[in-house]
């Protein structure tokens, strides 16, 4: 994702979910072998720069995934609901108990087009990539769309 979106996610988390932000700071401090108190006193721009660089590491997948899930569920709940409703998947405010094992190409394409028309393209791309990676069910047609559609390439949008 773009540095601007990464910073937006961290800023949103700092403002809307202080415990998650503090847990993220602590995890990054541990990963970088910094004293948490020292890291927390650094200017926020410097914190965010180190957080983004550190969360890109494979060992930090759980922390970064948690940040993304919370940001999506709290800030972009309507996008999640719109997508699941377009696919006719029962959900509770964007949360699903069980996904169907497959999804029709036409229905998936229409749902993605609807998201791109209504929501910020980079947020849509992040959501769809997260949806594809974080769920137990894998839809090959979604993976193909994510790989082929330039609008859904991470970092491709500003």
Image: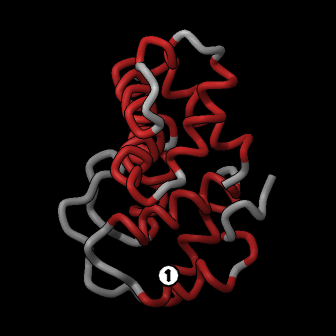
Q: Quadrant of residue 126?
A: bottom right
Of the pair 2 and 49, the residue shown nearer to us: 49
Residue at position x 34%, y 20% from top?
19
Element marked by disc 1:
helix
Looking at the image, is 103 positioned above or below residue 80? below
Where in the figure is residue 23, as x and y percent of width and height?
35, 27
Residue at position x 46%, y 26% from top?
34
- Residue farthest toward the left in the current orientation of the protein: 97
- Residue farthest toward the front in the current orientation of the protein: 33
Where in the figure is residue 51, as x and y percent of width and height?
55, 36
Residue at position x 40%, y 62% from top?
85
Q: Which residue is mark 1?
A: 142
Quadrant location, the N terminus: bottom right
* Label 1 packing within 10 angstroms: few (<14), some (14-19), many (20+): many
The colour scheme applied to this rendered structure is secondary structure
Of the pair 45 and 85, the residue shown nearer to us: 45
Taking the image as shown, residue 55 lies to the left or right of residue 2, namely left
Of the pair 36 and 71, the residue shown nearer to us: 36
Taking the image as shown, residue 3 lies to the left or right of residue 76, namely right
Residue at position x 48%, y 45% from top?
78
Q: Quadrant of residue 74?
A: top left
């Amino acid at each position: 994702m773009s540095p601007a979106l990464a910073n937006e996610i961290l800023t949103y988390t700092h403002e809307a979910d202080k415990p998650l932000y503090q847990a993220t700071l602590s995890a990054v401090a541990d990963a970088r072998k910094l004293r948490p108190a020292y890291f927390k006193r650094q200017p926020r721009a410097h914190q965010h720069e180190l957080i983004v660089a550190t969360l890109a590491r494979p060992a930090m997948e759980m922390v970064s995934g948690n940040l993304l899930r919370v940001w999506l569920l709290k800030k972009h709940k309507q996008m999640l609901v719109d997508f699941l409703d377009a696919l006719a998947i029962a959900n509770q405010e964007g949360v699903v108990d069980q996904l169907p094992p497959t999804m029709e190409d036409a229905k998936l394409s229409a749902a993605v087009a609807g998201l791109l028309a209504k929501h910020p393209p980079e947020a849509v791309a992040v959501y769809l990539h997260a949806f594809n990676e974080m769920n137990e069910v894998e839809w090959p047609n979604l993976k193909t769309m994510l790989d082929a559609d330039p609008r859904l390439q991470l970092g491709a949008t500003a």
